[in-house]
Amino acid sequence: MAESPEHEGAAAPPPRRRTAGRRSGPPGGGWGSRLPGGGWGGRPPGGGWGALALALPAWLVLGVFFLLPLALMLGVSGAERGVYGGLRPVADLAAYLRSGAFLASYRQTLQALYLGIAWRSLWMAALTTGLCVAIGFPAAYALALHAPPRRKGLLLGLVVVPLWTSFLIRTYAWMFILRSEGLLNHLLLGAGLASRPLPMLYTGGAVIVGLVYGELPFMILPLYAALERLDRTLLEAAADLGAGRAAVVRRVTVPLALPGLVAGVVLVFVPSLGQFVVSDLLGGAHTMLLGNLIQNQFAVARNQPFGAALAFELTAAVLLLLAAGARLGAGRAAGAAGAGAGAAGKAANEASASGQPQRSWELL
Amino acid sequence: MTGACIGARILAALLALPLALACGGGPGDARGARRLNVYIWTNYLPAEVVSDFQRRSGIRVEIDTYSSNEALLEKLLSGVADYDLVVPSDYMLQALVAQRLLLPLDRRRLPGFANLDPRLLDRKFDPGNRFSLPYLWGTTGIGYDRLKVGAPVDSWGALFDPRWAGRILMLDDMREAFGAALLLDGRSINERDPAALRRAAARLRAQKPLVRTYNSSEFASLLAAGDVDLAQGWNGELAKVVAQDRRRFAYVVPREGGTLWIDSLAVPSTARHLDAVYAFLAYLLEPPVAARVVGGVRYASANRAARPLVDPAIRDDPAVYPPPAVLDRCELIEDLGTLTPLLDRLWTEVKAR
Amino acid sequence: MTHPPHPPRWPRALLAAHTAAVYLFLYLPIAVLMAFSFNRARQTAAWEGFTLSWYGEMLRDERLLGAVRNSLVIAALATVLATVIGTMAALAFAPAGSRPRRGRGATEVLLLLPVILPEVVLGAALLTLFGAWRLRLSLATVLIAHVVFSISYVALVVRARLAGLDPALAEAARDLGAGSWEVFRRITLPLALPGIAAGALLVFTLSIDDYVVTSFVAGAGATTLPLYVYSLLKAGVTPEINAVSTALLAVTVALIAAAHRLLRHEPGSAG
């Protein structure tokens, strides 16, 4: 509906304000890829004090019920395991600290065995994320750009609905489907496609299926959001300028959707790292991943210091990854947005190229 | 209608929901009614046994379940879990006693104590049974498909046999898995020699490609469904499968030995409803009640006086009530104390590769 | 304006097929779940006849109903609390123009930590805290835990929404003489509402389905649905679980549909 005015506007450099203003798309603007600095441009009510008052409850609740227990756990990670699984009481705190014994658990996490587990988990999470992108991007693209507008909400809702069933139950459903007496084998045997039941359950493949299944909606949603806010006129302009279909996707769509992609990757990668249920149920508990390892320390080995140390290291690693990704992704997003826009005609995009880059996780 | 208006209405609706639900009568809000909080293994108390008790005594029984001893320990260590009755396994009972998390039992309030099987009393994990009453007991062994395996199985070696590659199931339990390997080596399941433990770990690592899955909850159903031909498992569940088709399935405690496990009733030191607990314990000690428990869970009861009352099909099932010869070669699992981290590390190595 | 040559049909068809396959994939277990909640057979995949007996068993299961009630109560309360607190936090720290706010980095990390930290650790940490305070485990402790890990999700979602808002609207309002509070109430809040709603929905989902943290901090009589389902699964999968899931799904979908209808007349709530 707003298309034709934009077409005319794209030919001549419009004044900056109008580009960032209402005509650029549905009210509410886009995901910020075209806005200078993003943000709702306002101050919280009450100014600075208002901001403090607004933030106070969150800080209070999280401070008391999150940071405080976390500090306790940090202390636990520096302690030693007691005989029966509690903590060994420390007689002389000063001596204990001086001797560096409080780092024992952390030192243990650096052993080859555990680094190997971390590496395998990383790889598995990366594989899951990659598959989610490969499967999710085309689907999100179709939803955002090809689906009839009246159905979009419904279709998107349908993507979310599976999340409303218990994750555990959905995983058990997969077991039901994949096991020797399960649905798939039943169908295969019945259709004569197999002479004996295929062992599908308790394989690495089953784990990947389960992981991808659980995480796919979390990839589709941010991608959809990013693609949906995309200015179609840019794509059309690129096509007008002679870019083939694939080139349009590669050089305009993907770069412009990059923030959504980054958000999706974060939403899928991080939980995948800490997964343990799927590899236990669908993988036959063959592989010990980081999530299993940490879970084990708290559940079986009763070695809380070690478990806490592992968890904190995982958290720190992810934070670093996110920070690095934000710097990279943000820079890339700004540059890509500029490049993508450039392919569609520089005029329309002075704003975004000069604007402050969006931080990746703001798009979660 | 503005957005904020709608939002406010939704917020109000959401707030009203819990109030409505909570007023609908939640668990444990019956004022004046006595109450008992039980924390027990899944499927360890038949529903009709509980409801019968509730009817007789007027005490409302609240049951929460756990599926690992360590989860129980975690809750009791925190000191704020508010359970009146727990059912730890042998080695966990040992740990709980050592950490003074249990209340000594007043034997005078439990005349049914005499009904208990003396063989199960006065064990290392609770000398003199100051803190616990044995509840159910059993063995760990191998359930197998006779038609597929052919010859009768009588050794743990069957689980390590390459002939059955991909058709073997092991319990996802560190102590039980190591137990099988240690027994095969001729050692005790409570072996403390690190070298012997390492050898057992090597055996388990070599076995891993043969194992279809490590699973502690579905070993029986997977055997019954034909996903595996040999399954390490606890006798009760396997006995149920065997009873369904004796021609096809069998359960055996191998000749090298097996695990004898005893789960006991105990009272946490933080328990608040002591009258209710003693009433329930006395109830469970009654022979007819114990017999009904056995019928429901198909594990052997520690209640000797109940045995004549048990369904003959179960009573004469050697899988459920093993003969003395079998019991003699079984051992109780003991807590390994400071060796647990080593064992966990070895287990991690088995699982990680 | 001339139109570009019509693009070839086949990529679109392929895309549509791919998307259909994705939906099929997403719904296969759900369909199986629902179908077999009506199956007379207990374990096998063979269809043995239609029956509603599992639903009957589900309704007769007192512990199950109690668990459902607990879950709903906690989810509702957690949604309200977390949404309010999280939205306030998002408003306080949303990027406002190009001025970076002091302390934003710290808040970023604070908000991210509950999302990143493995749930096992959060659960164990909270249990330790409650133990140290001698705070008895109950529905209240579960509620606290749920609110704690939910605030971040709301804050992040709302902040993303706020980041995408058009600053020109707020500026225009201010130009027209609206005070800070009025701008907030009549421009920002309504525009942010879809984000807030999305955040609330997310919290509800997370709370209803949470197992790990809840297993640590639930006390006697505070069994929630996931805990109960887990114990049912350990006891052996029966179709009663299928019935439970189907029923819960149906109720949730109905709720969402109703909410969607309510919000449909909402200006600016595109998508």
Image (cartoon, coloured by chain):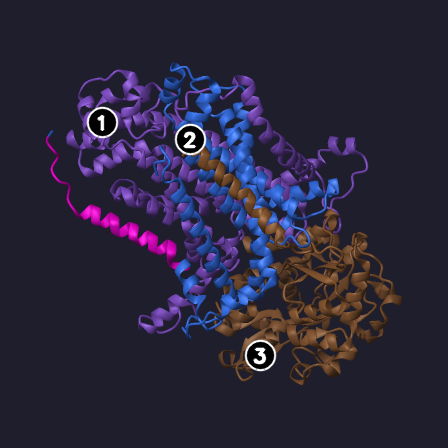
Chain colours: A purple, B brown, C blue
Residue nearest the viewer, comparing B265 with C240: C240
| Residue that mark 3 sits on | B242
Residue at screen point 23% across, 29% down: A2
Q: Nearer the viewer, mark 2 or mark 1?
A: 2
Residue at screen point 41% across, 65% down: C35
How many angstroms separate mark 2 from mark 3 (CA)?
65 Å
Residue at screen point 44% across, 70% down: C39
Specify few, some or many for label 2: CA neighbours under 10 Å numbering under 14, 14-19, or 20 or more. Answer: many
| Residue that mark 2 sits on | C190
**How far across and how far down the image is residue B201, in percent?**
61, 59
Magenta span: predominant SS is helix
Q: Is residue C197 above or below residue A28?
A: below
Quadrant of residue B196 within the rendered picture: bottom right
Specify few, some or many for label 3: CA neighbours under 10 Å numbering under 14, 14-19, or 20 or more. Answer: many
**How far across and how far down the image is residue A188, in percent?**
34, 69
Q: Are labels 2 and 3 on one chain?
A: no
Q: Is residue B346 above or below residue A348?
A: below
As shown in the figure, which amino acid type bears the numbered disc 3? Val
Q: Which mark is residue A343?
A: 1
How many angstroms separate mark 3 from mark 1 (CA)?
72 Å
Horizontal side of B349 relative to A71 (left or right) equals: left
